[in-house]
Image: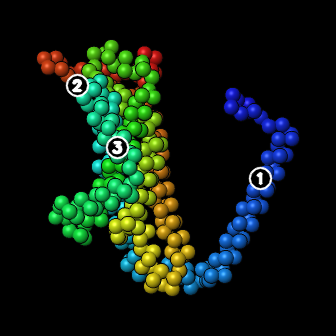
Amino acid sequence: MSSVLYDTPGPRAKRRNVLYTIGFLAVLALVAWWVLGALADKHQLDADKWKPFVTDSQVWTTYLLPGLTETLKAAGLSILIALPLGALLGIGRLSDHRWVRVPVGTVVEFFRAIPVLLLMMFASAIYREFTTVSSDFRPLYAVVTALVLYNASVIAEVVRAGVLSLPRGQGDAAEALGMRKGQTMMYVLLPQAVTVMLPALVSQLVVIVKDTALGGALLGFTELLSQNRQITANYGANTIATFTVIALIYIVINAILTSLAGRLEKRLRRGKKSAAVTIPAQAGTTDAKVDVKSDAVSGG
């Protein structure tokens, strides 16, 4: 099938693509053979390196599950705070009032430009010097603070881009119904923009889960990845096995998160076909409910 960006390959192009594919697979197989051979020479593929994860429950109850709990705790708190804060900042960047739009834009650009690792260092130092937070909880506080500040700024840009991607007729139709700008944003634009924003939001939530590992590397936060040091110290330097198991846990968590978001996106798209906009009653008027089909609104 041809399109503006793609032409159907001819016989020569097809043969060339097949040769490229075969060559790539051959190189990939050679690299995999070399890596596995090197690991075997270092005895990292021996059964006793992997056996503890199957036969010894203490590996899970003492190290992996507590580390996973801390990871989910930090990620969950960060997501719960960053999502609404990012939405507010994104709406602020769309404000018609310069005194709102400019300061909010400055905050968003400032925290979006600073690496998360540096934010964690600053947050930890601030909690240590200016608060009475216990040293036991300080790493968690620093990790959550840094993740919230950075990811709320990124989510704000996602929200802003999602709202601006909607057809201009959406806002015009809402204004024609007599809705104020705040009502238009809350009841018309944001609900429709969520469907557009969802893939980017899910990607950012996955980033939040993975970035908790930075706290373990820098601040001594006992998250999932940091447990590799304890496991390799107590189970015969099984570094590769430990990293592999931890990586699989991260993959499962993020796959679940992506799957849930995919289901939510499908439900939102189905509900969008017959969306209803409810206009809150104004002072001195009766309650009014106006049903606006998305197709009619998009037509202006």
Q: Name the mark on residue 280.
A: 2
**In this rendering, does residue 161 appear at all?**
yes
Query: What is the spatial separation of the Cα atoms under label 1 and label 2, in whole angstroms?
Result: 60 Å
Q: Name the mark on residue 110.
A: 3
x 44%, y 68%: residue: 225
Q: Is residue 272 above or below residue 256?
A: above
Q: Secondary structure at mark 3?
A: helix
The crowding category of the residue bearing disc 1, from other C-alpha atoms within 10 Å (few below 14, some 14 to 19, many at least 20), is few
**In this rendering, does residue 267 appear at all?**
no
x 82%, y 51%: residue: 19
The residue identified by callout 1 is 21
Q: Earlier in the sequence, mark 3 or mark 2?
A: 3
Is the Cβ of the residue at disc 3 closer than 8 Å to that at disc 1?
Answer: no
Picture coordinates of residue 128 (x, y %)?
22, 64
x 28%, y 58%: residue: 123
Is the Cβ of the residue at disc 1 closer than 8 Å to that at disc 2?
Answer: no
The crowding category of the residue bearing disc 2, from other C-alpha atoms within 10 Å (few below 14, some 14 to 19, many at least 20), is some
Picture coordinates of residue 59 (x, y %)?
43, 79
Picture coordinates of residue 250 (x, y %)?
47, 62
Q: Nearer the viewer, residue 252 or 215?
A: 215
Q: Secondary structure at mark 2?
A: loop
Mark whose residue sits in front, 3 or 1 = 3
Mark whose residue sits in front, 1 or 2 = 1
The crowding category of the residue bearing disc 3, from other C-alpha atoms within 10 Å (few below 14, some 14 to 19, many at least 20), is few
Query: What is the spatial separation of the Cα atoms under label 3 and label 1, in whole angstroms?
Result: 44 Å
Q: Amino acid at mark 1?
A: Thr
> Is 265 placed left or right of 66 in the picture?
right
Q: Earlier in the sequence, mark 1 or mark 2?
A: 1
